[in-house]
Image: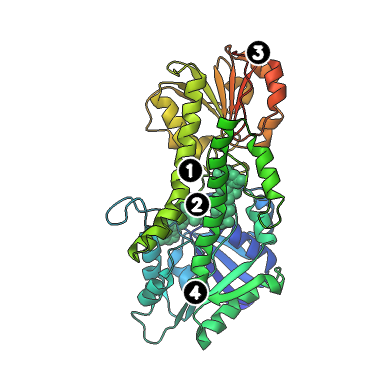
């Protein structure tokens, strides 16, 4: 098999990052054999089936086009390592939940296990590429483990952070703003880097492929996420001011975002950001800063996460206050559980926190979402209280006192709110945590509307 292809590329970890990234590489580079392996056999079975394990617009087409030709999914990690020339590592690196750095530092156990497995199974030199988001200088640990044995084998450890966002992963991969490849600035490091650049150059314009040293590359990924999440926390902080001053956060964001130095993106006020990266990456940097004694920097960065937590809690408190200071026994329909639209992913979704808080207030919940109900069930499996999961929004709202819009699915913009109003208990409330529905129209139908960062529209006097 090997001689038919220019190179064998392996990706360890077939998740939200590894899956789409490798599918696009395989699709764009038929001359390479691309294999994805995972310890999770069920996941690999799904990658090989008609129903892929993750929902991502456009992904099915890309996978189906390459699967079985030069894209393979396997659980045979050892042999795949042996055969590989280039190994991308995209195993999960969650926040540590135990011991030193719990709740802050990255848990590198899966990462280190992978490094050791690569060392154990390798019989030829390889290029190892960090794809998972990692603390700055993790490549050094990888290098030390890999070069701790086999005097004769050489491993070059590179950083090639992934900037894709879920829901737009395929498009982000096909048309990236930039591709970053960091290496040691030695002859061998630079040669290895060129091999990775050559892969992307099959479809990414050369001027968008940035070569860098490893540490700057690792850090850039974290810093990009700091900038993006900081914008969201800033506009969310402003949304709280707007609610007190009758200003409208959407108008403020528009006016501010038209300044080309600021730009219009990531200025949508919301119930807060979720997703597997933002919080994790910030806390990871906070932890590193503290380790280096940079306490002021750590506090500054940490405030982005604190503001995000505050925004979620503020949303629940606004609901409580608007609904006459009690939610006990009231039926609340949650529109959207995914952390953003166009994904079934619920990792760090603000909906988890909000749902749990509403249950604490003894509300009954009906959770509706077009793609995330499987994950939502898991997220709420340990919660007491009354929770139902109903995909059809018209059925879900039946007998409810309120709707909380928590994910910006297009679907919720175009529902028949007249029909929905008729099915609900009066006075009926909508808390639009994403500012996506037509507030005036729903108010005219009879709803009491509570947007984020705008004056509420109510019939309650
Ligand atoms: C993010 C980065 O965008 C991506 O580059 C990185 O590789 C991984 O982390 P992702 O978490 O998939 O990607 O989604 P993103 O679109 O950035 O949204 C993150 C969260 O911010 C979502 O919960 C989203 O709803 C929220 N958000 C985004 C807002 O609340 N307001 C905005 O204006 C934009
Ligand atoms: P990400 O969003 O970073 O892609 P995921 O959790 O979706 O994170 O994917 C990471 C994948 O890595 C999971 O499918 C997990 O089973 C896999 N994984 C973790 N450790 C290993 C390992 N040692 N070998 C192979 N796969 C692993």
Front position in the image: 268 or 360: 268
| Residue to which mark 4 is pinned | 214
On-image quarter of the C terminus: top right
Horizontal relation, residue 307 to residue 248: left or right: left
Q: Nearer the viewer, mark 4 or mark 1?
A: 1
Does ligand 1 reach within 8 Å of label 2's beta carbon? yes
Give the residue number, with chain letter if any, for mark 1: 308
Q: Nearer the viewer, residue 204 or 91?
A: 204
Provide the secondary structure element on which disc 2 rests: helix
Q: Check residue 422 in the rendering and tell me which mark sits there, or answer none.
A: 3
Q: Which of the labelled discs sits on residue 278, or is there none? A: 2
Q: Is mark 4 within 8 Å of ligand 1?
A: no
The residue depicted at 45 percent of the width and 39 percent of the height is 310
Q: Earlier in the sequence, mark 2 or mark 4?
A: 4
Residue 433 percent coordinates (x, y): 57, 33
Whether label 2 touches label 1, CB < 8 Å: yes
């Amino acid at each position: 098999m090997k001689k038919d292809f220019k190179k064998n590329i392996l990706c360890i970890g077939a998740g939200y990052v590894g899956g789409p990234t490798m599918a696009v590489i395989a699709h764009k580079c038929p001359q390479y054999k691309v294999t994805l392996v995972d310890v999770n056999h069920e996941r690999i079975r799904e990658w090989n089936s008609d129903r892929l394990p993750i929902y991502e617009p456009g992904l099915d087409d890309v996978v189906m086009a390459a699967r079985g030709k030069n894209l393979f999914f396997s659980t045979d990690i050892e042999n795949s390592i042996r055969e590989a020339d280039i190994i991308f590592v995209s195993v999960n690196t969650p926040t540590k939940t135990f011991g030193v750095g719990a709740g802050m530092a990255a848990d590198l156990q899966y990462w280190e296990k992978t490094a050791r497995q690569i060392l154990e199974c390798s019989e030829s030199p390889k290029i190892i590429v960090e794809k998972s988001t990692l603390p700055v200088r993790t490549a050094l640990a990888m290098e030390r483990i890999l070069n701790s044995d086999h005097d004769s084998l050489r491993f070059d450890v590179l950083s090639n952070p992934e900037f894709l966002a879920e829901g737009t992963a395929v498009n982000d991969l096909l048309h990236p703003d930039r591709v970053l490849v960091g290496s040691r600035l030695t002859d061998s490091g630079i040669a290895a880097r060129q091999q990775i650049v050559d892969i992307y150059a099959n479809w990414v314009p050369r001027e968008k492929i940035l070569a860098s040293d490893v540490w700057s590359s690792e850090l850039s990924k974290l810093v990009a996420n700091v900038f993006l999440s900081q914008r969201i926390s800033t506009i969310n902080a402003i949304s709280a001011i707007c609610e007190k001053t009758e200003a409208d956060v959407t108008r403020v964001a528009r006016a501010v975002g038209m300044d080309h130095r600021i730009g219009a993106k990531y200025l949508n006020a919301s119930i807060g950001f979720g997703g597997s990266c933002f919080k994790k990456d910030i806390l990871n940097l906070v932890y590193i800063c503290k380790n280096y004694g940079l306490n002021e920097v750590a506090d500054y960065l940490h405030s982005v996460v604190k503001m995000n937590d505050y925004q979620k809690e503020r949303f629940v408190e606004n609901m409580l206050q608007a609904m006459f200071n009690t939610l006990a026994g009231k039926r609340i329909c949650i529109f959207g559980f995914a952390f953003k639209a166009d994904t079934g992913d619920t990792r760090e979704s603000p909906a988890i926190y909000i749902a749990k808080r509403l249950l604490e207030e003894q509300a009954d919940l009906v959770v509706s979402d077009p793609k995330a109900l499987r994950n939502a069930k898991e997220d709420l499996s340990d919660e007491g209280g009354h929770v139902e999961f109903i995909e059809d929004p018209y059925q879900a709202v039946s007998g409810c006192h309120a709707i909380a819009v928590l994910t910006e699915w297009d679907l919720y913009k175009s529902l028949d709110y007249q029909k929905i109003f008729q099915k609900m208990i009066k006075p009926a409330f909508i808390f639009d945590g994403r500012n996506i529905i037509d507030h005036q129209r729903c108010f005219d139908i009879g709803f009491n509307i509570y947007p984020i960062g705008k004056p509420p529209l109510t019939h309650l006097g």
